[in-house]
Amino acid sequence: MRVGFYQFAPVFGDPAGNTARVREALSALEADLIVLPELFNTGYQFVSEDEARDLAEPIPDGETCAALIDLARERGTHIAAGIAERDGEAIYNACVLVGPEGCVGRYRKLHLFYEEKRWFQPGREPPPVFDVGGVRLGLMICFDWIFPETARMLALQGADILCHPSNLIFTLCHEAMLIRCLENRVFAVTCNRTGRDERKPGETLTYTGGSQVVDPRGRLLVRAGEENPEGQVVEIQPERSRNKDFNEYNHILGDRRVEVYDMINRPAVP
Ligand code: ACM
């Protein structure tokens, strides 16, 4: 299976232009799965809730989703992409998974980062896993990385590959995802955007690129540069994620001591 990403610098507020940029870039990539950045169509640095509402689109009936489905058909691939979703009065930071068969599913970001809390509502559902031709694809978005529960919930549902659209301004996540893959024995494709946003006086956001594919042993298979648009595809054997044996005595998921983990769901000591 050929999996990869296309990282670039979305132009704020230009969904049609950003989708056209992706279409152009994907014409040069042969892949079965491509991951795009978080909020790839709208850009990231909103300055008001109205702005976020105006740019957000329904899933699956919005223009971006329709264009992604067309593109997936044309290229014979699946695409996981971050888009701003509008559902009635609510706006979500969402990830959509589409393929030649149409919209496969959607995830609404659980762990909102920084000012995202001003524009978006947090998702209320666990991160989902979708079976696509026998390969199980899990969806998570950017800051979800710092909560190990997210990747674990995906692994417990049998995810082979974590699709991880991102807009990162640090590089901590890049290293942490090696551990998320190691501790869950899964692949991960993190697609991080490049460029910068200076839409708010006094606050420049510089994104760190470095999109990457990691294997179930926590090894980096490929990592992009930090600054430029870049697409990469790597060949993997997704079934490698199914072997959760650490050695002949230890099983990554089976050895969990769930009977003593109850406190995980308790509030933390202040
Ligand atoms: C992030 O969640 N965009 C850091």
Image: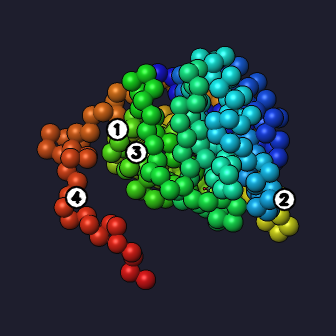
Q: Where is residue 258, by image quadrant? A: bottom left
Q: Pointer 2: what residue?
A: 199
Q: Residue furthest front?
A: 88
Q: CA distance from mark 3 to mark 1?
A: 7 Å
Q: Earlier in the sequence, mark 2 or mark 4?
A: 2
- CB within 8 Å, label 2 to label 3: no
Rounded to the nearest angstrom, the CA distance separating label 4 from label 3 is: 17 Å
- The answer to whether the residue bearing label 2 lies less than 8 angstroms from the nearest atom of ligand 1 is no
Q: Earlier in the sequence, mark 1 or mark 4?
A: 1
Q: Is mark 3 within 8 Å of ligand 1?
A: no
Q: Amino acid at mark 3?
A: Leu
| Element at label 4 | helix
Relative image position of residue 78 (x, y in whole percent): 56, 26
Q: Is residue 178 above or below residue 237?
A: below
Residue drawn at x 61%, y 47% as measured from the top left:
94
Q: Identity of the amino acid at label 4?
A: Val
Contact? badges 2 and 4 (CB < 8 Å): no
Image-quadrant location for residue 256: bottom left
Distance in Å between CA atoms under marks 1 and 4: 18 Å
Asked if labels 4 and 1 touch by Cβ distance under 8 angstroms, the answer is: no
Residue 28 placed where, x, y %? 69, 19
On residue 158, the disc is 1
Residue type highlighted by circle 2? Arg
Q: CA distance from mark 2 to mark 4?
A: 46 Å
Give the mark, 4 or 3, whose residue is nearer the N terminus.
Answer: 3
Quadrant (top left, top right, bottom left, bottom right) of the C terminus: bottom left
The residue where tag 3 is placed is 154
Is 35 left, or right, of 54 in this rendering? left
Q: Which residue is mark 4?
A: 258
SS state under label 3 = helix
- Answer yes or no: do the residues labelled 4 and 3 have beta carbons within 8 Å? no
